[in-house]
Image (cartoon, rainbow, N blue to C red):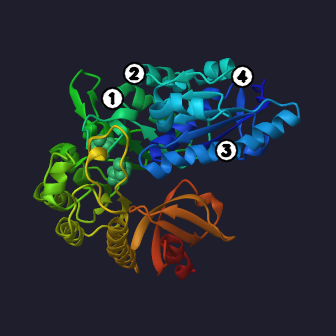
Amino acid sequence: MTPETPQKKVFIRTHGCQMNVYDSGRMADVLARDYATTDTPDDADLILLNTCHIREKASEKVYTELGLLRQFKDRGAAEGRTVTIGVTGCVAQAEGEEIARRARTVDLVVGPQSYQRLPEIVRAASGRRAPVEADFAAEEKFAALRETPPRKRGEVAAFLTVQEGCDKFCTFCVVPYTRGAEYSRPAPDLIVEATRLAEAGVRELTLLGQNVNAWHGEGPDGSPWGLARLLFRLAEIPGILRLRYTTSHPRDMDDALIAAHRDLPQLMPYLHLPVQAGSDRILRAMNRKHGVSDYLHLVDRIRAARPDMALSGDFIVGFPGETEADFAETLRLVETVTYASAFTFKYSPRPGTPAASLEQVPEDVKNERLYRLQALIAAQQAAFNRSRLGMEMDVLFDRPGKRPGQIAGRSPWQQTVHVPATPDIIGSVRRVAIDTIGTNTLSGVLADARVFEEAV
Ligand code: 5AD
Ligand code: SF4
């Protein structure tokens, strides 16, 4: 007998980082007994907004979207259906009470540490005023989620949250307040979850954490493990062909992790290593706990271990007190490191964080700096992509391409690669000869197929 398909439907809208993407998947998993997922709010009985609080623009979106979602609730009511609306994620954590007060549309508010209780919260919420669940108990959360196996989704690449929260307290950042203290999930749980994913067809795992390289745990013999040991262990799981991890703090790149980039072929040569700014004075004001030369030295060591390593980063322009000279040092750092890609942000004051109360840089200055930094990074990214022309590389194919007859995958450096091929290559790593560089994608032909065609 096949299990019954739930009659009710849930639509989950995800904003923000990859951890929210992972969390949304797990929310769908815990709700799966009562709700099937749908990719439109039109026919949903439950709508969840998984929100981001990292910058002002992101958190303001919640209130705008809630306004728009009201129509689905009203339409449902006109048809005699109850549509339940919930807010989850970091805005729920940080502004739970305010959301419940401001937005009459909202039936429930659930912070990131309470997702395991979603089914009961949803049941309790139908027809009542918004319960607000926002306490910190990462351990309880993951222990409960562990009991819920992920549904098969046919994904080739998947996220696995190994660490959550942050104790670094950069002065601009809300994460230590919204995601709580640093917590590492136990290694045995991660091995079980990774094995399940591999059995469901996953070939590439991206380990997630706000400070993923601070992950620490114990091996089966009780010995202390760092992220490098965990990566080696996960690489042994049959079916796992590729590993990545994000996002890292420079302070937590230990020798073992750098050596793993040299010794573990499954670990991809692409590292997101945010530095935020290129001036020692600003790094100190940001409480980053490292200077420019520490970062540059670290990058040298990583590249010595893995010469084809590509780096990406995060940068904030217009942090309070940033002068033109400070900003010029950020440009200089970017020129020295050369990035394959990077995220750039204007500083956004966040309530409750130390930097929010400092004197702010004017908006037009921030805009102008952002523009200059983005131009430099775009040029570096284009140069990096161009440097792949004529190269043969391994590509993990994970989906049909946009055009008929095309299959798309990822290069070791996170670039999208298209080849003419049949869907049977999805889920496998194949050699590709790159012959075209587009703005955002690379194209080529299967190198082994080409050899075959030349031979016949
Ligand atoms: N303003 C602008 N950018 C921020 N980030 C975090 N907090 C802020 C803020 N208040 C950026 C950092 C971080 C990334 C996830 O978001 O660059 O690495
Ligand atoms: Fe935020 Fe800094 Fe922690 Fe990263 S390391 S999550 S930027 S406080």
Residue at the image position 58 percent from the left and 57 percent from the top: 426
Q: What residue is pinned by disc 3? A: 67
Q: Is residue 74 visible?
A: yes
Mark 4 or mark 1, which has the lower sequence index? 4
Asked whether the beta carbons under mark 2 and mark 1 sit within 8 Å of each other, the answer is: yes
Name the residue rendered at 38%, 73% in the picture: 378
Give the mark nearest the N terminus, 2 or 4.
4
Residue 85 position within the rendered picture, expressed as x and y whole percent measured from the top left: 67, 33
Whether the residues at callouts 4 and 3 have beta carbons within 8 Å, the answer is no
Q: Which residue is mark 2?
A: 139
Q: Position of residue 65 (x, y in %)?
A: 63, 46
Mark 2 packing: few (<14 Cα in 10 Å), some, or many (20+)? few
- Relative image position of residue 110 (x, y in whole percent): 54, 28
* Residue highlighted by disc 1: 183
Q: Is residue 402 above or below residue 36?
A: below
Q: Of the residues shown, which amino acid type is indicated by label 2? A: Glu
Tell which tag, 4 or 3, sits nearer the viewer.
3
In which quadrant of this rendering is ligand 2 seen? top left
